[in-house]
Image (cartoon, rainbow, N blue to C red):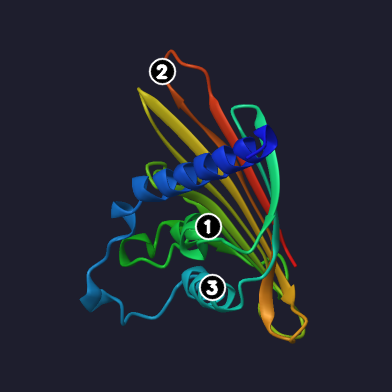
Amino acid sequence: MTSFGRVVSTSSMQSNRILFAFSALFFLAGCNNPAQQTQPNVYYDVAGFVQRQITLLSQHKPLVNKATQIKGERSRQATRNINWNRELELFSQADINKPALRNSYQISRPDSLTYQYTLKKGEEKLTVRSLRVQLDPTTQQPRRIEAVLRTGNPLYTSERRLLLESGPASDSQWQVQHYQLSGFQQLSYFDKNEFRVEGVVQ
């Protein structure tokens, strides 16, 4: 294996570990009482859309041009070998349709195709700080989803900025076309550990 191949392989493994670690940190926050799941959604069903995309992408295995930057080390690769459950897990974590969060976000509609959710004052302990969903005017499917996730305590700070863009694929199915995850984690007295992962789906 060439040195470039080793860098790509190592960086890919590092990016997967970081995405998995970030997702695991907030798994408990997403646990709910199953008996409460029958309540109607207050906010747009981001989790449902992301799960449908995970299923579709896992079946089709499209080619993805993926760029990763971790601690200043960059890599690029073109691959079909992606665990979509892990790759899009942070977008699932951006879902705010949980019974405990029903009154935690200010809802605004900048226009008829946009849903904007902003954390209310006094709710700063919650992970999802903002969520924005823009729909396609023809299909009413999400064209663009943006979210900011942030956590912190005296010893640890973490922020993730998410972007998911979708559109019609060659077979006319609505599919993720581009995704981006960026942010950092920082322990007190240590430098920021910054990361950026971007994928373009063919």
The residue sitting at the front extreme is: 1
Seen from the viewer's position, the closer of residues 114 and 195 is 195
Residue behind mark 3: 58
Res. 77 in view: yes
Pick the quarter of the image with the C terminus. Answer: bottom right
Cα separation, mark 1 vs mark 2, equals 28 Å
Please name which of the two marks, 1 or 3, marks the residue nearer to the observer: 3
Res. 94 in view: no
Mark 1 or mark 2, earlier in chain? 1
Badge 3: few (under 14), some or many (20 or more) residues near its Cα, within 10 Å?
Answer: some
Pick the quarter of the image with the N terminus. Answer: top right
Label 3: state its secondary structure.
helix
Cα separation, mark 2 vs mark 3, equals 39 Å
Q: Residue at the spot x=73%, y=70% of the render?
A: 111
Seen from the viewer's position, the closer of residues 154 and 50 is 50
Which amino acid, mark 2?
A: Ser
Badge 1: few (under 14), some or many (20 or more) residues near its Cα, within 10 Å?
Answer: some
Query: As displayed, is residue 14 above or below residue 155?
Result: below
Q: Residue at the spot x=55%, y=52% of the render?
A: 130
Q: Residue at the spot x=69%, y=65% of the render?
A: 63
Residue behind mark 1: 87
Q: Position of residue 92 (x, y in %)?
A: 47, 62
Badge 2: few (under 14), some or many (20 or more) residues near its Cα, within 10 Å?
Answer: few
Q: In which quarter of the view is residue 167 placed? A: bottom right
Seen from the viewer's position, the closer of residues 125 and 9 is 9
Which amino acid, mark 1?
A: Glu
Please name which of the two marks, 2 or 3, marks the residue nearer to the observer: 3
Residue behind mark 2: 188
Query: As displayed, is residue 183 above or below residue 82?
Result: above
Label 1: state its secondary structure.
helix
Which amino acid, mark 3?
A: Ser
